[in-house]
Image (spheres, rainbow, N blue to C red):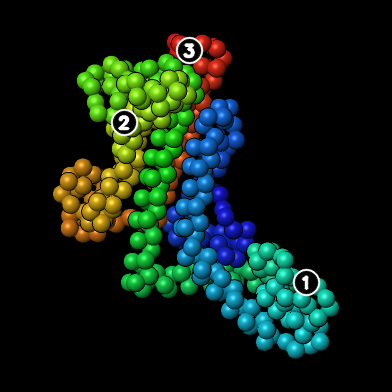
Amino acid sequence: MATTNNDETLNPPGFEKEFEWVLDIAPLSECVQRLKSAELVQGATAFETNLKNIHSLLSLPGTTIGIGVRNFYWGLFYQHTFSEEDVEAISQLASLLRGEITPDGVSYKRMPQEKRWEKASQLLRQHFGREASTEEIASLILSTFKDLAERPKFRESIRILFLSTTTFLWTSFECLVTDCWVAALNSGSISFGHRALSALPVEETTDGISGKQIEVNLLARYGFDIRNHLGTILSQKFKFSSLEGIRVAYISAFQDERSIDSMLSNDILKYLESCRHLIVHRSGMVDERFSNKNPEFRQEVGKPLFINGKQVSEFGAAVVEAGVRLLNYLDGRLRIQRNKGIERDDD
């Protein structure tokens, strides 16, 4: 599982299981590393970074509790013993935590905070005298979280955290599919852009582009050469804010209905889209339309949308899977175009 903190005492093994969420972005990271099409790297990297940020957001309660528990143990350590050897160790520990200079001249001012904490934890374990101290801290973190989870205000805060994560997951996916579609059409392959253009209505429009023609003033804006701008121009004519809109845009450009449907036909992804819409447009209150569209999830009309860590985990897994499949698909299509060295996509 991808993590953003190297200190296991802050997010100990098993914490996600207790918290009921897991976000594994390893398959995505491997996919990004394998990409051969430079056009896709920016969108893919942004997607990966967004998912790492989501992981950090979900880790916030556990990290906060972990720091509090660890500081409690550090406080005990300050009062643990008063031998000359331990007084020296306490002085070093205090300098570490504060980023100061020790009495013997060792400076911790420029040491990153995370490194100072790591070194302080090592010193704590060395002088605390109990091999199981780290496990004890981890156990207390979980116990503290359980106690807090019984409090209504804390439970509501966690629910809001999960709702925020849900919208963040959908937005990250929406940005990925939009950016990569634009990048693929901007790659210089006229065939992708021509297909997307041909799918537009033939009647004239006010924005200078239709399925039949592109107005001169729009062409002039790009120096009468739009080969590397078709994705940017045409993206305004498609809607990427829904799975159906994404499906239409990709089938229009790539003429591969079977592959596109296979990538997007995921019930959890569809539910994620519905939940995001309800959260943003209905402040997360379940209405008849949402309930009728998603009967299998048994959300009660008139009640706040209930999303737990397990559901967030499923949303995350669906987004990662769809993102990886999409990137692999586009990478393959773009490589075929380059290898052929022609402007006609016959695959």
- In the picture, the disc for residue 343 is 3
Residue labelled with disc 1: 107
Tell me the kind of residue under disc 1.
Answer: Ser
Asked whether the beta carbons under mark 1 and mark 3 sit within 8 Å of each other, the answer is: no
Tell me the kind of residue under disc 3.
Answer: Glu
Identified at 55% across, 62% down, the residue is 11
Discs 1/3, front: 3
Real-space Cα distance between discs 2 and 1?
Answer: 58 Å
Q: Would you call the spot at circle 2 few (<14 residues within 10 Å), some (14-19), or many (20 or more)?
A: some
Please identify the quarter of the rendering in which residue 70 is found: bottom right
Residue 210 visible in rendering? yes
Tell me the kind of residue under disc 2.
Answer: Phe
Measured as percent of width and height from the top left, residue 33 is found at 60, 35
The furthest residue to the right: 104
Sequence-wise first label, 2 or 1? 1
Check disc 2 and report its element: helix, strand or loop.
loop
Question: Which quadrant would the C terminus be assigned to in this image?
Answer: top left
Check disc 1 and report its element: helix, strand or loop.
loop
Real-space Cα distance between discs 1 and 3?
Answer: 62 Å
Measured as percent of width and height from the top left, residue 244 is found at 29, 32
Q: Would you call the spot at circle 1 few (<14 residues within 10 Å), some (14-19), or many (20 or more)?
A: some
Sequence-wise first label, 1 or 3? 1
- In the picture, the disc for residue 161 is none
Measured as percent of width and height from the top left, residue 274 is found at 28, 45
- Tell me: residue 310, above or below residue 74: above
Sequence-wise first label, 2 or 3? 2
Residue labelled with disc 2: 238
Q: Nearer the viewer, residue 80 or 157?
A: 157
Identified at 60% across, 65% down, the residue is 9
- Tell me: residue 246, above or below residue 227: below
249 horizontally vs 77: left or right:
left
Please identify the quarter of the rendering in which residue 198 is found: top left
